[in-house]
Amino acid sequence: MIQKISAPVSVQLVYDHRLRTVMPRQIFWDGKAIRVAKVGMHHTVREGRTLFHIFSVTSSELFFRLKLDTDNLFWTLEEIADGLPN
Amino acid sequence: MDYPIKLDFNRRPSSIMHIDLNSCFASIEQQANPLLRYKPLAVAAYDTPNGCILAASIEAKRLGIKVGLRVKEGRLLCPDLIVRSPDSDKYRSVHLALRKILSDYTPKIVPKSIDEFVLDFSGTPAFQKGLFFIGKEIKSRIKNEIGEYLTVSIGLGPNRFLAKTASNLHKPDGLDEINEKNFRKIYQSLSLMDLCGINRQNTTRLNMVGIYTVPDFFKADIPLLRSAFHSILGYYWFLRLRGWEVDDLDFDTKSFGHSYSLPKTLTSPEELAPILSKLVEKVGFRMRHSDFQAKGVHLALLYQDHQYFHEGKSLDQPIFDSRDIFRVAMRLLRHSPYKLPVRNIAISCFGLSSRCTLQLGLFCDSIKKENLVTAIDDINDRWGNFVITPATMANTEKYVHDRIGFGQIRSLI
């Protein structure tokens, strides 16, 4: 089941200069701190000239699609899914 | 032209590599969302029961779910089928990442579609390493640099056709070669329909001249193949099956078009106009972005009862403004003799020429019009598609979504 959300969200992002990796570590959503277990994919999208970074991540039981607006560095939670049929 | 009557199989070592990303859209969705992995999943144009399945995961394919089935048919085969809508940006991103990896090995890369590449290694330093070694390295780099769940089938051969055929031998995650040593054995294991380009109709043609198997096809001489195909195609097949190259052609852009399957049928031109306007805006933007103008517009309509209307109109002067394209398209739409519910609508512009040769008109200020169109395109480019739109395409947000077409990817950079 997928739930489209499109709401502001707090995200803790970690940059490791040795491994040259950038990944969300925690999401603060619905009053809970959710630890990111895995980053499935990271890709970028342009809307006009604004570049967005999309992180597809999972916690132990949920999938989150996070969008970072590089103009203002604000995060949006676009989607939550549980990996079950609609 | 005289054709060689006898020709041996090409003895040159394989220099062509065909790469096919397995279950492309579905695998990318499973890569992005690990909770979907190892589950039957389909990516469909719409997740409604009548939505057409565009890609099935390897697990769904094992249950008989194929591209082209409706979602409701897929759910009959697998009630737990997970259905996702396509996310074109994600697939383009993987395509570009894959292209970046491949460009480290050879500059001669031809993207055949969003999930297929042909690489020519002739004359490259990488060729010295051996294509099997490179194939394994590419597979490993895809897993490390793009996604561990993505697999590709790689085919090697002396020409594009055999490389493609080899890539289909083992799916998923295959790495096979067809060369002068093994081609007879592999041909024996294939049916005519396994060959790319031989469909049911071509099979019938071949059957009519006594060709029933791939070894029969290989052994057939040119006069027999000519009598089957009634064209130069017979000679091309004679060469293809012997490993000689006939498919390394690069075609110029001849037209720009968009089509759309309507979620619900619409009948009157007034109902269809907003959707047609949006299709025209997309076509016009792409055409101008590639610096072309068109001297013709073509409209095709598929009706609910499978009747088909299409008509093209050639123009005296080239056009580039979407408003002009829309005017011609609406004239064609009103010209349709059938007043039936429309299922599918397609618009294209043909007779392309470079926009640098703008003809000044007597009755309108072409330069002023070009400046206006360029300004609108610049604004849409800066702030996102459809920021400025004509009033004719009002209320079309839910129609004509971004989609990846089948076939060659030209404008993706």
Image (cartoon, grey):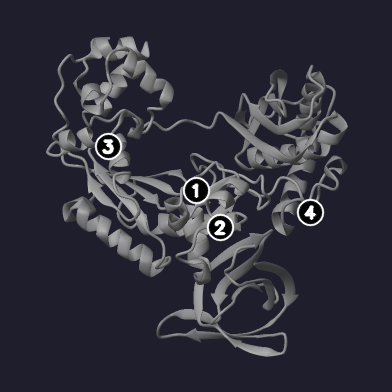
Q: Earlier in the sequence, mark 4 or mark 1?
A: 1
Are circles 2 and 1 on residues that touch, CB within 8 Å?
yes
The mark closer to the camera, 3 or 1, is: 1
Q: Amino acid at mark 3?
A: Leu
The mark closer to the camera, 3 or 4, is: 3
Residue B291: tell me if it is visible: yes
Image quadrant holding the C terminus of chain A, namely bottom right
Give me the disc on residue B81.
2
The answer to whether tags 3 and 4 share a subunit is: yes
Are circles 3 and 1 on residues that touch, CB within 8 Å?
no
Q: Amino acid at mark 2?
A: Leu
Give whichever of B61, B236 is nearer the camera.
Answer: B61
B200 on left or right of B336: left
State the CA–CA distance, disc 3 to disc 4.
47 Å
The answer to whether tags 4 and 1 share a subunit is: yes
Per the image, label 3 sits on a secondary structure element best described as helix
B222 on left or right of B350: left
Q: Which residue is mark 1?
A: B65
Residue B355: tell me if it is visible: no
Q: Earlier in the sequence, mark 2 or mark 1?
A: 1
Q: Which residue is mark 4?
A: B387
- Residue at 69% x, 31% y: name it: B347
Per the image, label 4 sits on a secondary structure element best described as loop
Q: Earlier in the sequence, mark 3 or mark 4?
A: 3
Specify few, some or many for label 4: CA neighbours under 10 Å numbering under 14, 14-19, or 20 or more. Answer: few
Q: Which residue is mark 3?
A: B162
Per the image, label 1 sits on a secondary structure element best described as loop
